[in-house]
Amino acid sequence: MTDYYGYRKKFAVLVPSTNTAVETEYHKMCPNGVVLATRACVIPPFNVQNEDDFVNMVKAIGAATEQGLRDALTCQPDHVIFGYSAETFWDGKERSDREFQRYNQIAQEVGGCNITFGAQAILDALACYPWVKRIGVISPYMPVGDNQVVKFLGDIGYEVVRIKGHCSDSPVTIAHEDFGKTRQLVREVDGDDVDLILQAGTNLYFVELAAQLEQELGKPVLAINALTFWHALRNNGIPDRVRGFGSLLAEH
């Protein structure tokens, strides 16, 4: 027997408890026959006024991750998607790979399944655009978080030409940033010297805007929530081309 609505796959979606965007955007992109079970890594609604506050927020997510994963595995999913990104980039590729292996091993041992991790999903997604070398990045982060994105992308062979962040004042208010302000950040990082735009920060609504910007800019614009969901679908044998959320889901 299989899950009634998840007769193709059941995905557990692990998010910080302050996050609303991941589950909303995943449900918009979700094919028939796939069910999403959102579970939380519980963190406080931090007041983020400086870089130390941001680092403390990321550390809190990391500290809550293992228990959150074990809680998510109780629904016996086919796969677990980690619906956050900053903690997966932190300190570059070597640490990211180590953390991925740690959590994937827990998922395999406890639930007999694998995970999608933001950093590794970015690596796989960028491979779909083999001509891309130079990237413009936007995020909701403080500069210390942006620096971690630059380090990770450098570790995997990409140059970040420009990066701009919203500097959102809490993990909750990331989801309050409006499209007009986000569009302005994209304009600030774009240019003829940029092959692709990448957005980090999973509580920043962006998947539909990314699709619009691809048409306007004539280059790939990748939203973190679209690429992690794409990674989970493709690694679980679901080939559906999902329109309206950018070229990655529609063409790859």
Image (cartoon, rainbow, N blue to C red):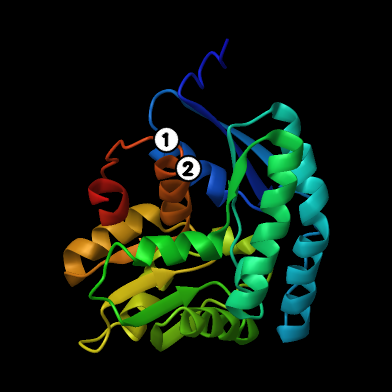
Give the x, y percent position of residue 50.
72, 84
Residue 42 visible = no
- In the rendered view, tell whether residue 154 sits above or below residue 98: below
- In the rendered view, tell whether residue 218 sits above or below residue 226: below
Give the x, y percent position of residue 49.
72, 80
**For this rendering, which residue is in front, 159 or 31?**
159
- In the rendered view, tell whether residue 150 sits above or below residue 171: below
**For this rendering, which residue is in front, 186 or 118?**
118
Residue 223 in the figure: left or right of residue 141: left
**What element does badge 1 sit on?**
loop
User: Residues at badges 2 and 1 in contact (C-beta under 8 Å)?
Assistant: yes
**Which residue has dot 1 on it?**
30
- In the rendered view, tell whether residue 185 sits above or below residue 111: below
Res 108 → quadrant: top right
Q: What's under tag 2, amino acid-wise?
A: Tyr
**Which residue has dot 2 on it?**
26
**For this rendering, which residue is in front, 166 or 74?**
74
Residue 174 visible = yes
**What element does badge 2 sit on?**
helix
The N terminus is located in which quarter? top right
In the image, what residue occupies the spot 79% across and 70% down? 59
